[in-house]
Image: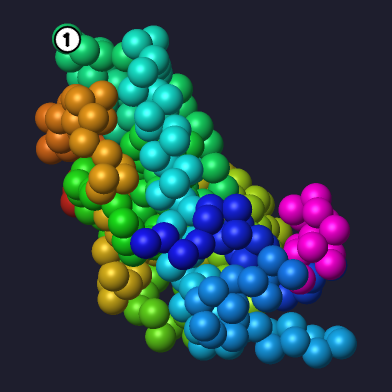
């Protein structure tokens, strides 16, 4: 027997997220007393206390933390079910693909071309998202498939296939102390300023907050930070920056992901097309400090060792 209605769960989640009944009531567009009564009814029905309340403070109990974690998944599942039901009845439905700007490692054109040859191919709508919510697009049904980066994007609740595995590189200004190194280790980066990604809690970054790779590269150019990213995300690099392989950083995987409960032919057809192209993944070479060395003059002659020599 279902003990909570979807609306009640939405009420609880609003208070759990805000930890403030007034802000939660504004978010839900209801009166605060009505929200307080609804939460008390939920606690009575479940037989547990969900919040510790005082005149100035609201916090979750262990029972509340458990309901918050699983309640979010439940609401996402309901949203996805509604969207998928509506889309299943729409014969003109498009396939929606979510990714970060520039986050396809050069594979997307080939995937779309392969998919276009499928007999049941549909139009593909491309959606761009920030650094923190691509997986949520797939869980709640806003997108059908997505290009995600593991281990950075959470893959729980998602089916996925790896399209490309690549190393990670440190991006530094050309005059940086590490710019001339053939490679570095993570320990060599200790003491360096790393970015904080907007919307992504935790992490080791202590530098300015950035929303995407373009912003991060700009901040590196002006020597405000350095970055460590999958190699394909930084191709091509702006002038004045170089990248150095980080030998002990875990490799990055570009994956095609979709909701593990989504078994529609619409999605299966796109997955099959993508898997047919994954062996053709592009390999990138980032500029290094050596690339800043001037090229020899076309009029240079060569010495006896076959090396260029000034005329």
**Could you tell me residue 200's position as x and y percent?**
56, 65
- The residue drawn where x is 15% and y is 30% is 272
Locate residue 213 relative to residue 207 in the image: left or right. Answer: left
In the rendered image, residue 207, in percent from the top left (x then y), is placed at 66, 72
Q: On the image, which quarter does residue 109 sit in?
A: top left
Foreground residue, 250 or 300? Answer: 250
- As displayed, is residue 81 above or below residue 28? above
Q: Main secondary structure of the magenta part?
A: helix
Vertical comparison of 113 with 128: above or below: above
Q: Circle 1 sits in a helix, a strand or a loop, which is it? A: loop
- Left or right side of 1 for 195: right
Question: Left or right of 299: which side holds 163?
Answer: left
Nearest the viewer among 121 and 34 is: 34
Quadrant into which the C terminus falls: top left
Instruction: Please say whether residue 26 is one of the residues in the magenta stretch.
Output: yes
Q: In the rendered view, how is the structure colored?
A: rainbow
Residue 43 x/y as whole percent: 59, 77
Q: Which residues are magenta?
A: 23-36
Residue shown at the point (44%, 35%) measured from the top left: 82
Q: Kindly indicate the quadrant of the structure image that contains residue 57.
A: bottom right
Membership of 224 in magenta stretch: no
With respect to residue 19, does 150 lie above or below?
Answer: above
- On the question of residue 192 being in view, the answer is no
Residue holding disc 1: 119
The one of 135 and 283 positioned closer to us in this rendering: 135
The residue drawn where x is 39% and y is 70% is 181
Q: Residue at x 41, y 60 (%)?
A: 2
């Amino acid at each position: 027997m279902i003990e909570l209605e979807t609306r009640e769960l939405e009420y609880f989640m609003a208070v759990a997220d805000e930890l403030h009944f007034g802000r939660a009531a504004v978010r839900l567009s209801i009166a605060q007393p009505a929200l307080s009564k609804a939460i008390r009814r939920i606690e009575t029905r479940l037989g547990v206390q969900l919040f510790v309340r005082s005149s100035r403070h609201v916090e979750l109990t262990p029972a509340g933390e458990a309901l918050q974690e699983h309640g979010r998944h439940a609401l996402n599942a309901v949203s996805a079910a509604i969207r998928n039901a509506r889309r299943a009845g729409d014969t003109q439905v498009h396939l929606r693909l979510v990714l970060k700007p520039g986050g396809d490692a050069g594979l997307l054109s080939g995937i779309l071309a392969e998919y276009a040859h499928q007999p049941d191919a549909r139009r593909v709508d491309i959606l761009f998202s920030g650094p923190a919510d691509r997986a949520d697009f797939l869980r709640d049904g806003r997108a059908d498939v997505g290009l995600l980066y593991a281990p950075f994007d959470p893959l729980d609740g998602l089916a996925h296939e790896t399209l490309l595995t690549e190393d990670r590189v440190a991006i530094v200004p050309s005059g940086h102390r590490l710019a001339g190194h053939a490679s570095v280790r993570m320990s060599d980066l200790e003491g360096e300023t790393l970015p904080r990604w907007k919307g992504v809690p935790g992490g080791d970054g202590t530098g300015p907050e950035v929303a995407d790779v373009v912003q991060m590269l700009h901040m590196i150019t002006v020597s405000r930070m350095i970055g460590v990213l999958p190699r394909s995300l930084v191709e091509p690099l702006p002038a004045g920056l170089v990248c150095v392989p980080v030998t002990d950083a875990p490799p990055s995987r570009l994956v095609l992901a979709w909701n593990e409960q989504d078994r529609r032919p619409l999605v299966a057809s796109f997955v099959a097309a993508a898997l047919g192209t994954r062996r053709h993944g592009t390999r990138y070479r980032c500029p290094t400090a050596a690339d800043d060395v001037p090229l020899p003059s076309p009029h240079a002659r060569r010495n006896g060792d076959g090396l260029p020599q000034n005329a």
